[in-house]
Image: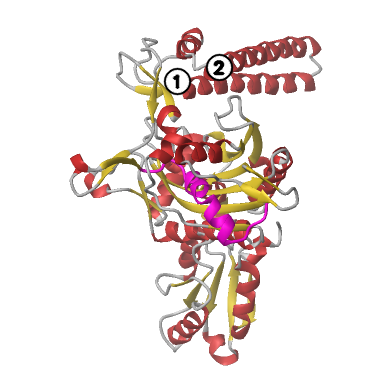
Amino acid sequence: MSNIKPEDFFKNVISHSKEYGFIFPSSEIYDGLGAVYDYGQLGAELKKNIRDYWWKAMVQMNENIVGIDAAIFMHPTTWKASGHVDAFNDPLIDNKDSKKRYRADVLIEEQVAKIEDKINKEVEKAAKRFENFDAAMFKSTNARVKEYQEKIDNINARFKTALNDNNLAEVKQIIVDLEIVCPISGTKNWTDVRQFNLMFSTSMGSVSEEGNTIYLRPETAQGIFVNYLNVQKTGRMKIPFGIAQTGKAFRNEIVARQFIFRMREFEQMEMQFFVKPGTEMEWYDYWKQARLKWHLSLGLGKEKYRFHDHLKLAHYANAAADIEHQFPFGFKELEGIHSRTDFDLKQHEQFSGKKLQYFDPELNQSYVPYVVETSVGLDRLFLSILSSALKEESLEGGDTRSVLSLPPALAPYKAAVFPLVKKDGLPELAESIMKELKFDFMMAYDEKDTVGKRYRRQDAIGTPFCITVDHQSLEDKTVTIRDRDTMKQERVAIDKLHSILSEKTSLQSLLKML
């Protein structure tokens, strides 16, 4: 879909997701609930396969990493210790005319992105002029590029200082100086910037007045930290070692948008790696490269990923970077890698009064480990894979097809079985093949419409292989197997189908690339 505008392509992704059973608006019969979505029958399978690949790569393939499943509800002091009660905020600003609320940092980042677009356009112009040997105009254009870049550097420097100093007045002043207008009203009539805590709160107990206020966890990491000593002792873990978990987290996002990219209920896949103090930067660099390699193994294109170092470090970190992915709406954060120092464990030591130290037999001493974190949003990962895989291809004769070129190991269905016609014993043979293969593979069965239409539907949902049973199958026990991406067909023996699917659709095919 190279000729389509990014915003139109993104609309296609959203409509394709609903049409084929990947993602539905939550509570749609009641007009939905903002920034909350349900995964349909195919979406649930794709999401599970992505989660399984992450888990196998992170836990099964690393002998010094184990997994847990901590509860969503945690003692409320957990969030006081972690800093979320006092510091888990977004800077918000309202437009007085439209009455709409925005994240101040997002407004500034989007304005910077517009300036970057101007740079790209100037560079494109310069390239064309350079081809025409117009050196004077090229030099003039280059000066404008330099001017735009200096403006971006200045904005970023001011913004970083303002965030680090929690100077909300300066954040507003940057918005004023950049002459940012409200997308709805078109005016610059802004309120002051203020902080808004993102945690959902509820109460525990049979009567709300008598219950304690607790929070829906805004991240899964704290469940790992409070269980650090339990896991270390019961698993006889030696540093360095990691604890991984996947699970739901909840954030009361004011500006929730861009489909499943930013939701109020989402799923994280996190691993906290405990290391000896002084070695954290070595492991930070290691996990940056290891996680990028994992993403590249999906085969979506190296050009779709880049590292972005944080302008502002979180209160717990001494180094942080994002792996950004090129979504239809631009490069955005996909996974974070953070060197969290010993902040979390020391905070929980202080607030709980319990020692959370590791006795190092090599040094014959105890210390609080440092932590390197990798954290990826499963929903964002789902969106990155779905949007990168969706293509509109031209075929011979002027026809087109929508194809979801998912990595075969992640596809909801590994293969679909078709009887050529609904008679002559073909459905019975097709069903017997289906029953044999479904013990080990998610399979689809379809006998409606022409084979060509059935191919198109399976292409659109990402099924990597289609198996067609015809009259020859009754004679020699062979079938036609069609490849989704190449559309090539070959004749294979029925008893070879299991080994073919095992080789080409198992997670092992991805794990071997790590």
Q: Is residue 441 left or right of residue 284?
A: left
Is label 1 in a helix, a strand or a loop?
helix
Residue tagged 2: 159
- Magenta-highlighted residues: 216-239
Q: Which mark is residue 218?
A: none
Q: Is residue 509 left or right of residue 347?
A: right
Q: Is residue 102 left or right of residue 235?
A: left
N-terminal label among 2 and 1:
1
Tell me where residue 62 appears, x and y as whole percent.
Answer: 66, 59
Q: What residue is at 51 percent from the left and 49 percent from the top?
A: 224
- Name above or below for residue 332 compared with residue 365: above
Estimate the spatial distance between the alpha carbons at disc 2 and disc 1, rounded to whole Å. Answer: 11 Å
Q: Quick check: is 35 in the magenta stretch?
A: no
Name the quarter where the C terminus is drawn: bottom right
For mark 2, does the 10 Å Cα neighbourhood hold few (<14), some (14 to 19), or many (20 or more) residues? many
Q: Which mark is residue 104?
A: 1
Q: Residue 395 sits in which quadrant?
A: bottom right
Q: Which residue is more in the foreground, 357 or 221?
A: 357
Residue type marked 2: Phe
Residue type marked 1: Ala
Colour mapping used in the image: secondary structure
Q: Residue 339 sits in which quadrant?
A: top right
Is label 2 in a helix, a strand or a loop?
helix
- Name above or below for residue 256 compared with residue 419: above
